[in-house]
Each structure stands twice: as structure tokens, then as C-alpha cells.
Amino acid sequence: MKNKILIANRGEIAVRIIRAAKELGYETVAVYSSADESSLHVKLADEAICIGGNQSKDSYLNKTNILSAAISTGCNAIHPGYGFLAENSEFVEMVESCNIAFIGPTSKTISMIGDKATARNIAKSHGIPIVEGSDGVVSDQHEGLKIAKKIGYPVMIKASNGGGGRGISIVRSDEEFLSAFERTSMEAETSFGDKSLYIEKFIESPRHIEIQIISDTFGNFVHLFERDCSMQRRNQKMVEETPSPILNDLLRRRIGLAAIKLAKAIHYVNAGTLEFIVDPKGNFYFIEMNTRIQVEHPITEAITGIDLVKEQIKIAYGKELSFKQRDIKINGHAIECRINAEDAMHGFTPSPGKITNILFPGGMGVRIDTHIYPGYEIPPYYDSLIAKLIVHAPTRREAVKKMRVALEQFVIEGIHTNIEYQYLIMHNTDFIKGQYDTGFIARFNALVEAESSE
Ligand code: ADP
Ligand code: ADP
Ligand code: MG
């Protein structure tokens, strides 16, 4: 029987996965919503099946339709990409019970570590530092208020099942607490179908540092160093780089070891990311684990030379990792800019519509992962991410320069994008020095707005 993979996703990541599968000689099946009929992943896959209407809940979140598509086309594996059903343990359980390989960890692992409040407790029980906060999910707003008073403001209220930066609030006083709790609870319910919340102390001016790990069914665990994702707007990443400008070798080794320790403790299999925040004194705290491929994985691929998606597929088909920790070295510096269909200069409002013309940048060390093409119409129903621009150069300074040139030569006509905004970031003195924290974009926005209103 030929190996055949169904890709349960859309957009750039579906294209990314199809390419990896084809390079391995595997057949591919794309699924699409009615809005995505003319999307690139549909054209590139060997077969494509419509799984429902425009809204995600009718198509990319429709578990039974996706499984039926996999069974009827004879697929023996499903790659979930990121978002949608990638971290849905119920879906993964269904896949497992159909004897189809899920390209990711088991449903049991996902239900355990995917719940962010539970993940904190697991990390703590293995001696991994976590941010001070509630012991698991908070039962109601009154218990929440007590905990907030105890740990001291500011605090963060977070959805236990949250992701993508949504379902998170910062609270700075008792007065704000009850209404913020209510609001976040409702947002969690509507966005994630689960209103469970937990509380963490808000760490001021932190860096977001995450560790990419990968492991196989033979018990081999390797970490592929860090990604610095501190450039965030509303807790959502915009620019990522590796290595992090703030880590020295000692801290890098300590965080890497903590990540591997936790991954081993939960018998994790496949690619995963452990997210940490690092305070200005260099203390690090585990915040969550993403049990899937991440948007920013290409920068790790650039500096390590490892194709993470191909490795994910091979692991799911029972192959052993072909490298050991000692084989992995950091080679140069990589930066990714997320290119979004949004009017960055006017409040980041989404900008769907028809792309009339595109000119892609290129050259040595420039990579673009995208699903857009001239004439493509961006539907309004999904994420605004339309491309990822990744550069790789021997040094950080050269990588920044390469990114500037690439952004300058990246033309997308017909819609608004954040290309110009990213270009401005690449010229900011603090960014150039590597001195930024998760509050950078909020401060930078104020500057950009002041300048554009002059
Ligand atoms: P990454 O964590 O890979 O760096 P994001 O946090 O931006 O990137 O998440 C990637 C995509 O997945 C985004 O479209 C985001 O909205 C979505 N996403 C992440 N986690 C969840 C979740 N738990 N539920 C629904 N969507 C999610
Ligand atoms: P998501 O599941 O949406 O990715 P995370 O828990 O990873 O949510 O948090 C998203 C972002 O919010 C982090 O990358 C970080 O910038 C910020 N953040 C999370 N927890 C804290 C905290 N305790 N203090 C300060 N910032 C935090
Ligand atoms: Mg996160």
C-alpha cells in the first residue's frame, strides 16, 4: 500500500506539508472549504476533497467530514498543521480509533499537556520553574480575586484551553478583576468552547523564548535550540528570530535542558514547542507547550538544516530520528516576518480581497512560505497570515539587512499588508540592538501613529 497523507489544514502550512510529503514520495490529499476552492493547497495536492462551508466550524473544524475524507481516499496518516484541530484531543482520539496515524503526539499526551492549567502543574511537579499563580483552574471569580490579591497585581487571567493570544487579560487592580474575569470567561467559551480560566502573575517586560524539541517512538529526544518571539502584538507573534539576542550559552543550555526534561517526563513523541518567558533578570518560567508544528518553525530549520515537517512525518510512520543532540549546531542567524493581510498603518484592520499583482523577493538565504498568487482572492473567514518571509545569514546584522532588502522588494497589490510596518521595525534602533520585550510593538505603534499623523 502506498503511503498517503491527508492534510487537515489550509493556507501556507497546508502547502508546506504537501511539499514535504511529496519530497518523501508520499501521496497527498487536500481538504478545503467552499471558500478555498481556488486555494493553492488544493491545486498542489494529488487529490482534493471539499469538506464543507466557508465557516471553520463547518469545514476545517468538522471532525467527521475530515475523517470521512481520509477514509474514502485511503489515507494512512493525517497531518493537522497548526490551529484548527491540531491540538484537539477528541479529534486525535477519533483518528487513532480509525487506525490512521496522527502526525503529532497521542491524544492522551495532548489532553494532558494541552490543557494549560494542567501543564503548569505537571511542569512544577518535575521541578521546572513556572510563573506564580493559581493551582490549576480557578473555580469562580471570588476564588480568582483571592488568588490575585495573594500573588499581587498585575495578574494575567488566561483561558486554560486558549491559543493564538486570545482569551488572555491583564488585570491591574481589585476593581478591574471581577469584570475582567467575566469577560475573559465569555471569550474563552466562545473562542475555545471551554470557559475554564487560570491565573498567573504578570511578568513585566519579559522576553518570549521557546524551545523546539523533537522525539521519536524509540525514546530519542533532541532540542533544536530556541526561538525568540518577543515581538508580539496583543500576545500574538509578529517577528521571530533565532538564536535569541539575550541568551548566553549557559542560559541557553539551562532552558534547553528544562525543555527536554519535561518532554521526557511526559513521554512526548513528535515535534513540540515549550514556551517560556524570561524576565529582565534572566529568570525563566515555563508557560505552555504547543503539541504541534509552529508557525515560526522555518527559522529553526534555517539554523539547524533540519526539515521539521519531514521529520514529523517520518516519526509518525515509525522511523527513528537520524540525528543526535551532539549533531545539532547553530549555524548563523535567522529571522521570520509574518506577512498579514491587514492595514497595519490603520489599526491592523483585516484586509481580505483580490490580490492583483505580486512580486516575491528572492536570492541567497531568502525563503517564502505562502499560498498566495496573483489573482488569488483572500477569503474573510480565516487567519490574516498570508505569507512568511524568512531570511538566513551568517550573523544577526547581516540577517537584518537581508530582511530589509527582501521586504523592500516584496510587492503585493490589491490589498493592504503589514510589509511596510515590518520594514519600519527592521530599522528601529532597539530592534537592531536586540533590546526589545513583549511590550515593544505597543510602544512602537504609538510612535508610528504619531509620525503618520504629522
Ligand atoms: P504559534 O503558536 O505557532 O507561534 P500562533 O499562536 O499564532 O502561532 O498560532 C497559530 C495559529 O493557530 C493561529 O491561527 C492561531 O489563531 C491558531 N491557534 C493556536 N492555538 C489555538 C487554539 N488553542 N485554538 C484555536 N486556534 C488556535
Ligand atoms: P497562547 O496559548 O495564546 O499562545 P500564552 O500563554 O503562550 O498564550 O501567552 C501568550 C503571550 O502572552 C506570551 O507569548 C507572552 O508574551 C504573554 N504572556 C503569557 N504569560 C505571561 C505572563 N505570566 N506574564 C507576562 N506575559 C505573559
Ligand atoms: Mg503561546
Image (tube, rainbow, N blue to C red):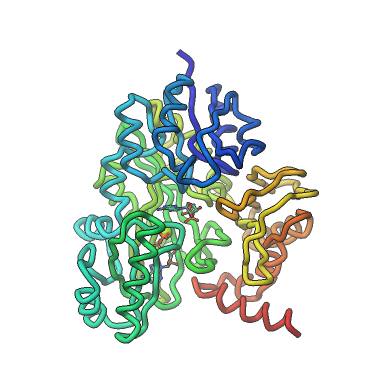
Q: Position of residue 297 (x, y in %)?
A: 52, 48
Q: Quadrant of residue 422?
A: bottom right
Q: Position of residue 189 (x, y in %)?
A: 35, 59
Residue at horizontal 36%, vertical 65%? 186
The answer to whether residue 435 of the structure is visible from this angle is yes
Residue at horizontal 53%, vertical 38%? 307
Front residue of this view, candidates 354 and 286: 354
Front residue of this view, candidates 107 and 311: 107
Front residue of this view, candidates 72 and 284: 72
The answer to whether residue 325 of the structure is visible from this angle is no
Q: Quadrant of residue 440?
A: bottom right
Front residue of this view, candidates 303 and 64: 64
Q: For the C terminus, which image quadrant?
A: bottom right
Q: Quadrant of residue 258?
A: bottom left
Q: Position of residue 72 (x, y in %)?
A: 45, 21
Residue at horizontal 39%, vertical 75%? 170
Left or right of residue 190, residue 107 in this image:
left
Q: For the N terminus, which image quadrant?
A: top left
Q: Count the marks: how many?
A: 0
Quarter of the image where ligand 2 sits: bottom left
Q: Position of residue 147 (x, y in %)?
A: 22, 76
Q: Is residue 274 above or below residue 270?
A: below
Left or right of residue 230, residue 45 in this image:
right
Residue at horizontal 55%, vertical 76%? 442
Q: Is residue 306 above or below residue 165?
A: above
Left or right of residue 81, residue 64 in this image:
left
